[in-house]
Image (tube, rainbow, N blue to C red):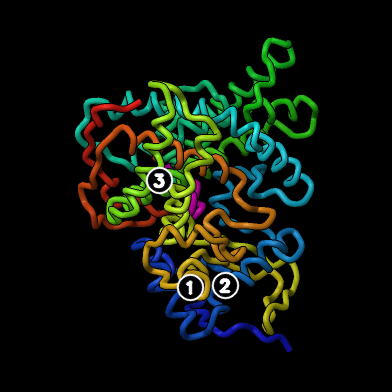
């Protein structure tokens, strides 16, 4: 006899979807959806979300079990609308060998030599962005600004794509709005608008990919170590298709810019509310800046010295995870901790299940970056997921956060306009007012 976890399945078909969405919109998923159910049923409970019976699992052991059994017991399972908009040929949908092949190409761009080459490029993208958008301003929207910047960095520093970021930014934003909406493809619906925007992006990218291919085949373009060249080289060798190149560019631009810009914005919010942490962080960056000539770019070695800054960023992502978790689908009946999860059911692991648990993080609701000075239990801190599906761009996100923090804190005095600004979600978290900050240039800076 199968023993299912306890929990409520809610209304027929709808299940507990309405409560889930309501909690999500107000960024109260932990307080008003997960926590009351964990209290009542324990760390593993069943529910019904978006038409699927779902088992929610919490804790480092559960995270490790489900993340490391990817492709064996579970497969990634995103809502139809997400798959349609990100692309069926993206790494998020691929299994087994084709997943490994694509992932290998992506991670080879983000190895040590790739990252070393990327730092000066990133410095110049950030420098240009600040000059263009912060110069002579007294107040800016930090969230809007970092979204535009992370978007630019992905296009320029990761892919080496020469399209003006401004022309694509709004189109990508329209696609994102439809990612978790009902997949109804008629004009005027969120999904309809998103599909239209998606085909606009596709046209531009296909043009870019074909130009690149022609240049590489004609010997006019060197393989420059950037991701677009690597994907096109694999395309020329016949290892992947043009659709796979397009879908993975689209997916990575999304994955990289939205979550990273939220992490950066919240890092500044935390620093503003914790002046002691801010003075420690500032000292770290002033020491690095002291050894630079005016206008000299940072190096990968400089970034490695930003240890405390990375503790601050991780503690920020622990308290404000950019994603709440991720859905998997059981490909077979799974026995776990005395329960059976039937084949075909969804499994949802959550970041809150460990990030807010005092077993892993004593006094979990307080901001304490130095807890990351010691090793953290594996699979307890999971803002980037884990296992074979660990976020492929996580090294890029890390660089992006550290380098931008460096330029802002060494060049500007800044303060939050609304220290208690609310965070909302749709479908990802964002500050309700765009996190405006007041800025003034520091008199002497590199």
Q: Main secondary structure of the magenta part?
A: loop
CB atoms at circles 1 and 3 under 8 Å apart? no
17 drawn magenta: no
User: Is mark 2 in CB contact (under 8 Å) with mark 3?
Assistant: no
Q: Element at badge 2?
A: loop
**Residue in front for this viewpoint, 110 or 349:** 110
Which residue does the image show at 59% across and 34% down from the upper left? 115
What residue would you read off at disc 3?
A: 264
Q: Is residue 229 visible?
A: yes
Residue at 55 percent across and 79 percent down: it is 43
Tell me which residue sits at (67%, 86%) in the image: 3
Cα gap from disc 2 to disc 1, whole angstroms: 8 Å
Q: Would residue 408 appear left or right of 151 to someone viewing this image?
A: left
Residue marked by disc 1: 357
Q: CA distance from mark 1 to mark 3?
A: 24 Å
Q: Which residue is mark 2?
A: 59
The crowd level at tag 3 (other Cα within 10 Å; few <14, some 14-19, many 20+) is many
Mark 1 burial class by Cα count in 10 Å: few <14, some 14-19, many 20+: some
Check whether the beta carbons of the residues at disc 2 and disc 1 lie within 8 A of each other: yes
In the depicted view, which residue is nearer to us: 379 or 162?
A: 379
Where does the image place residue 257, in percent across and percent down from the top left? 47, 41
Find residue 280 and report its horizontal and vertical position in percent. Answer: 36, 49
Q: What label does residue 340 carry, if any? A: none
How far is mark 2 from mark 3, CA to CA? 26 Å
Instruction: State the extent of the magenta-drawn residues as a range.
Output: 178-190
Q: Based on the displayed image, in which of its 4 quarters is residue 241 positioned?
A: top right
Picture quarter containing residue 250? top right
Coordinates of residue 38 in the picture (x, y in percent): 49, 80
Q: Position of residue 110 (x, y in %)?
A: 63, 37
Query: From the viewer's perspective, is 139 left or right of 301?
Result: left
């Amino acid at each position: 006899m199968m023993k299912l976890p306890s929990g409520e399945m809610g209304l027929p078909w709808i299940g507990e979807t309405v409560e889930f969405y309501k909690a999500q919109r107000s960024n109260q998923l932990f307080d008003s959806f997960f926590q009351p159910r964990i209290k009542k049923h324990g760390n593993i409970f069943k529910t019904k979300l978006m038409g699927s019976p779902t088992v929610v699992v919490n804790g480092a052991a559960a995270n490790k079990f489900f993340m490391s059994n990817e492709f064996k017991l579970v497969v990634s399972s995103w809502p139809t609308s997400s798959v349609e908009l990100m692309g069926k040929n993206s790494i998020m949908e691929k299994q087994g060998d084709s997943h490994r092949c694509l992932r290998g190409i992506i991670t080879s761009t983000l190895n040590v030599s790739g990252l070393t080459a990327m730092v000066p490029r990133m410095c110049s993208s950030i420098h240009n962005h600040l000059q263009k958008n912060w110069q002579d301003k007294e107040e800016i929207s930090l969230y809007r600004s970092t979204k535009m910047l992370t978007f630019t960095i992905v296009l320029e520093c990761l892919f080496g794509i020469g399209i003006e970021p401004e022309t694509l930014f709004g189109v990508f934003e329209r696609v994102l709005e439809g990612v978790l909406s009902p997949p109804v493809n008629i004009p005027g619906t969120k999904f309809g608008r998103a599909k239209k925007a998606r085909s606009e992006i596709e046209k531009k990218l296909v043009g870019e990919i074909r130009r690149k291919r022609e240049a590489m085949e004609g010997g006019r373009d060197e393989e420059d170590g950037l991701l677009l060249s690597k994907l096109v080289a694999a395309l020329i060798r016949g290892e992947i298709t043009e659709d796979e190149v397009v879908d993975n560019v689209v997916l990575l631009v999304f994955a990289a810019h939205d979550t990273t810009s939220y992490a950066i914005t919240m890092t500044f919010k935390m620093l503003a509310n914790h002046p002691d942490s801010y003075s420690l962080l500032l000292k770290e960056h002033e020491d690095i800046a002291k050894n630079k000539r005016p206008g000299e770019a940072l190096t990968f070695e400089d970034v490695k010295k930003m240890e405390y800054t990375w503790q601050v960023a991780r503690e920020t992502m622990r308290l404000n995870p950019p994603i709440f978790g991720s859905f998997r689908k059981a490909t077979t009946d799974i026995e776990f901790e005395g329960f059976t999860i039937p084949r075909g059911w969804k499994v949802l692991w959550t970041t809150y299940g460990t990030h807010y648990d005092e077993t892993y993080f004593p006094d979990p609701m307080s901001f304490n970056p130095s807890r990351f000075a010691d090793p953290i239990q594996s699979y307890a801190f999971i803002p980037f997921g884990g296992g074979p599906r660990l976020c492929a761009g996580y090294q890029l996100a890390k660089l992006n956060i550290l380098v931008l923090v460096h330029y802002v804190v060494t060049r500007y005095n800044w303060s939050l306009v609304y220290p208690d600004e609310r965070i909302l979600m749709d479908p990802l978290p964002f500050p309700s007012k765009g996190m405006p900050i007041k800025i003034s240039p520091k008199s002497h800076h590199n």
